[in-house]
Image (spheres, rainbow, N blue to C red):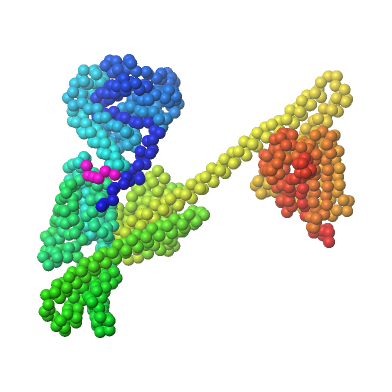
Amino acid sequence: MPEPRRPEPEALLPEARRENRGRLKVFLGAAPGVGKTYAMLEAARSRLAEGQHVLVGVAETHGRAETEALLRDLTVLPRRRVLHGGRILQEMDVDALIAARPDIALIDELAHSNLSGGRHDKRWQDVEDVLAAGIDVYTTLNVQHVETLNDTVARITGVRVRETVPDRVLEMADQIELIDLPPDELIERLRAGKVYVQDQAARAVANFFAKGNLTALRELAMRTAADRVDAQLQEHMAANAIEGPWPTQERILVLLPEGAAGRDAIRIGKRSADRARTEWFVLALTSLRAEEAARREASDTPGAALRLAERLGADNSVLQVEGDAAAEVLDFARRLNIRRIILPRPPARNRLARLIPTAHERLANGLTRMATEYELTLVGDDGRPARHRRSAPAPALPQILRLAAVVVATVAGVSLIAAAADRLIPVLSLSLIYMTAVVAVASRFGLWPSVATAGLSFLAYNFLFTPPRFTLTIWDQGQFLTLVLFLVASILTGNLAARLRGRVIAQRAIADRTRKLYDFSRKAAAAAGFDDVVWAAVSHVATVLEAESILLVPDGNGQLAIAGAFPPEDRLAPREMSAARYAYEHGEPAGRGSATLPASRWLFLPLGQAERRIGTLGIAHEDGREPDPGDRRLLEALADQVALALERIRLSEDLAQTRVASEAERLRTALLSSVSHDLRTPLVSILGAAGGLDQPGLDETGRDILIDTIREEGERLDRYIQNLLDMTRLGHGALRLNLSPSDLRELVGAARHRLRGPLKGHPVEVLVPEDMAPAAIDPILIEQVLVNILDNARKYSGPGTPIRVTARSEGDHAVLAIEDEGPGLPPGSAALAFDMFWRAGQGDGGQVGTGLGLAICKGIVEAHGGTIAAEPVHPDGRGTRIVMTLPFAASERPA
């Protein structure tokens, strides 16, 4: 019982995408004035009568009274006013339409260009947003506004419209209703002033609305609607596993069997498709055996035919067949809903030769028997008489002799085994031993050696084991029937074993190709950078296809340049480079084995899609042959994998650059925020104190206070600016250390003196041993570190709280600690305290500052080869201790 067909997974994806999306209905017209808006409004009134919420987003009546009458019972959305060119104009309000959430929205003139300032440039983009919101849309469109028909309409009418709609928008349509009028009736409407005003109508009839133009536009509109309906039919058949073909739009399939040139069949298919104005496909059949034979004989039969079909505009496919070719061809035709099949007629052969049919003959016979629902056309192959047509090349003589020796040796060996068995262990049927040999030969060498083994085994068994022995005479009729059945069974068994062998070889080849693709995917995934992916690609392609490989990508100027090659190559000849550029610019194969620049030694395939082309991948065989169909399919699969790997690397690099830019923007914003506040605060204090000095009646005490304020705020401003300079030098690696043996007690004292104003009210306890060895440091920079840490301790601890500075020796480093009695750092933020622009928002009082002080301290201390860390003073988390290590001077290090 045949297994029922299942829906194709790819066919279910469009249905899944439509789940939460509105439905689109397009009223398609051949020309202006056929009544698209009228038909749309009539359909909307029918939906309104059914109780649905219908909202008119925009409807252009062009002053036609009968069209305006249909708007009376419909809710019309107020339009948005737009200032354009000094005038107030009106546009559809997309946001208000989506917010109203109607069941159906009417949006006229899909190809309309919006005025500046709207959500989108084109109205069809607004429609996409409305559909995405789950609202059904009725819209109108003339055929001349379809993107791919724009040039055709311009050639027909002499008028090129500027507003177009991408074809994919029509492909989104769930329904297309063709609105049409006969040319004479449309021209009569035009002259009556129902389309344009009278002076415009006269010009229109003489130009765009000529009867011949309207007839051609009608046909274009009908074909556009038919193509979309046919596409929907194919989606329905695939999604519901419906067996084809259905007798709808005609499609033509040209078959190229193994070994058939098929050029005449391709030309006839092209002429038939042109007459029917329909799609046509070319399907080349191949097998592992045929590919190996073509590789040995350097035959270009399928490649030349496919190139001809490509030049003539066919949709080419290659199908590897190891079993029933006719069944697989019909399955291919059903999937594409094809009803007409064109097949080259098998070459005429004599009756004896026809006893063993060729693959071409088996295909023709199978299609004749099975294709009852199809129109099958047989055409002569290349138009030459059969007697002049070259027969298929025969196997080489050494190969024939080798196989003959194998057959004879096998039968002789089996005969010896059978004779021994007949003497030592009586066997009821010695013929089974010979049949085993036939199966073994079939599974190892194929069909024809197994048939020869079966025939020779028949003769040997008759000669050696049937009475009278050692003659070919048969006395017993029963023995004769046994021998005949033995021969038939041997041939059938050998045939089945040979077919099984072919299937096994085919599965091995498929598994081998899958493994090769997997190996490359694994290598590409492990590659860390662009160069790694390029090297993995060219080396893997060269190894797998046993050919030279090369990868070209655009450089900074947009010109193709060699990114990698195996074996290494740094230049290409002008002819090869032209083929590579063509493949890159046009997105089509070029070079050896293609329809473009076939004289090139290299075959180039484009990498990536048109909107993001990455480069080209090329291969060349040392003997100059083109890739056979199997290698070509593998190369195309590898090219897709290479494109994905390179795209992944490029996206990773873009993401990294985006992160860097985002981080730089964040730092810039934080810096500007901090600088704008923290530099302004001391400046305001300085300016205020300086202004107060000029006030009359100011006594000496007040003057001293203002002078102290100016000095303290000036020093504070100096510290901010010094921090910014230090951070800039650290960020650019421009910090230079002037190391000298320095006394830490003196540096702590200098830092306290610089902060004598801010540290008022904070007792500072310094516990640095007097005999501590000097440290090898830059005293100016370390003094700045101490100033920053003491200023932080003062800032984040309460008034009057003590600050302690301690130091001790630990090996060849001095350990210096500064601690305060403030509320401490928030839990888990000790490491964050040294990040730029990080400030303790709550734990240490929420004081303001640039957030650069400790980050600068970390950079300076680590530049000295030391370390710095933050930790709580008390077990409950209160207080903050900043601990840093600094190296002793070499001559002063404690023993």
State which quadrant residue 871 falls in. Answer: top right
The verdict on residue 211 being magenta is no
Residue 114, given in percent of the width and then of the height, sits at: 39, 27
Q: Is residue 16 above or below residue 208?
A: below
Magenta-colored segment: predominant secondary structure: loop
Residue nearest the viewer, comparing 2 with 196: 2
Left or right of 846 on screen, residue 92? left
Q: Residue, x 21% and y 73% (percent of image)?
A: 454
Nearer the observer, 228 or 510: 510
Instruction: Judge by depth and name the residue closer to the eye, 671 or 574.
Output: 671
Q: State the image quarter where residue 848 is shown.
A: top right
Q: Which portion, as a residue range, is magenta?
A: 241-246
Q: Is residue 564 visible?
A: no
Report the front residue among 425 and 868. 425
Q: Residue at x 30, y 34 (%)?
A: 146
488 in relation to 285, above or below: below
